[in-house]
């Protein structure tokens, strides 16, 4: 009698997930000054998923930019653990895993728009032909293909910021770190740049950690808004944005009832955290 070989049970497929873009566990930062120690951050726990757009918002001096600088390896945490795609920030920086854009575009005035975009590639030894091709691709992405030969001084503030964003994407980073990149722009240009950034992020697939003081800006751009308390900076609340489920965001999105609801939710979280920090009973 032949005993049939048992049929093996089906094995569930193994799903691999990319490492989170940023993971902070108990991160703190204390600065030593002449007048004593200043605790800028304390006990920060945060995860930014690959491809996710997360904004940091809170009162001035709450440590938003400090946290961004720690992720960028421009400073080191005093306590806790911080990883970027599963690696220490220094290793991520050396691997060009992220790009950075600040409030000021920081373009070199003597270099053309194209040469400014090519600069990170040039510094890392990429050949001229490859640099030129990548710069052309990026300038088309940010809508400045016709301005490649111009100098920064010949561009408007919004156009300069687009060049800075293109430069931050030059090495195909999986993460963008942005510290109030539209803070110095007029309101009309700022809203146009927000719409452009949504498109650029969708095309690049990069995760974004974005510092802003503007609630509407944070809501328009983000999947989640992280609300921070006054110094020492802690995460007081994380607000998921319902608009993140929409396929695209346009100027008309700002008139949507869901947009206003999300703005209200972030405002209440922000003001509630500020009130709690002053010791007022919120019950």
Image (cartoon, rainbow, N blue to C red):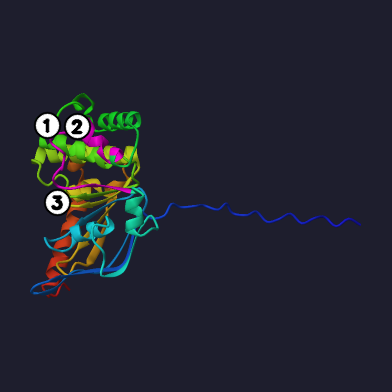
Which residue position holds label 3? 214
Left or right: where 19 falls relative to 266? right
Q: Is residue 178 visible?
A: yes
Q: Quadrant of the N terminus?
A: bottom right
What percent of the width, then of the height, locates residue 279?
12, 75
Asked which quadrant contains residue 56, the reply is bottom left
Which residue position holds label 2? 113
Tell me the magenta residue range. 98-122
Question: Which circle's residue, 1 or 2, is located before the other in the chain?
Answer: 2
**Residue visible at 8% across and 40% down in the picture:** 186
**Residue visible at 15% across and 36% down in the picture:** 160
- As measured in the structure, the alpha-carbon distance from the residue carrying label 1 to the one carrying label 2 is 9 Å
What percent of the width, then of the height, locates residue 32?
15, 71
SS assignment at label 3: loop
Left or right: where 158 falls relative to 86? left
- As measured in the structure, the alpha-carbon distance from the residue carrying label 2 to the one carrying label 3 is 29 Å
Examine the rendered structure and indicate whether residue 104 appears above or below residue 283: above
**Residue visible at 29% across and 38% down in the picture:** 122
Mark in front: 1 vs 2: 2
Callout 1–callout 2 Cβ contact below 8 Å:
yes
SS assignment at label 1: loop
Which residue position holds label 1? 155
Q: Is residue 252 visible?
A: no
């Amino acid at each position: 009698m032949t005993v049939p070989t048992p049929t093996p049970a089906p094995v569930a497929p193994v799903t691999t997930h990319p490492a989170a873009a940023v993971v902070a566990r108990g991160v703190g930062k204390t600065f030593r000054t002449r007048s004593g120690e200043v605790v800028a951050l304390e006990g920060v726990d945060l995860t930014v998923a690959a491809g996710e757009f997360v904004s940091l918002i809170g009162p001035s001096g709450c440590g938003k930019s400090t946290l961004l600088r720690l992720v960028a390896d421009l400073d080191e945490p005093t306590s806790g653990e911080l990883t970027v795609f599963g690696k220490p920030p220094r290793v991520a920086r050396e691997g060009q895993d992220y790009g950075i854009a600040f409030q000021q575009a920081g373009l070199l005035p003597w270099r053309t728009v194209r040469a400014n975009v090519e600069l990170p590639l040039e510094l890392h030894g990429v050949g001229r032909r490859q640099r030129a091709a990548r710069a052309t691709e990026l300038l088309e992405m940010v809508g400045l293909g016709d301005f490649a030969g111009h100098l920064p001084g010949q561009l408007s503030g919004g156009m300069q910021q687009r060049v800075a964003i293109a430069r931050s994407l030059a090495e195909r980073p999986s993460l963008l770190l942005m510290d109030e990149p539209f803070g110095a722009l007029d309101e009309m240009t700022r809203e146009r740049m927000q719409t452009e950034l949504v498109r650029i992020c969708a095309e690049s697939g990069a995760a974004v950690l974005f510092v802003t003081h503007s609630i509407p800006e944070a809501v328009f751009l983000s999947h989640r808004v992280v609300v921070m308390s006054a110094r020492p900076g802690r995460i007081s609340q994380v607000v998921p944005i319902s608009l993140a489920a929409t396929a695209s965001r346009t100027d008309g999105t700002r008139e949507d009832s869901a947009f206003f609801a999300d703005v209200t939710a972030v405002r209440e979280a922000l003001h509630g955290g500020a009130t709690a920090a002053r010791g007022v009973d919120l019950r």
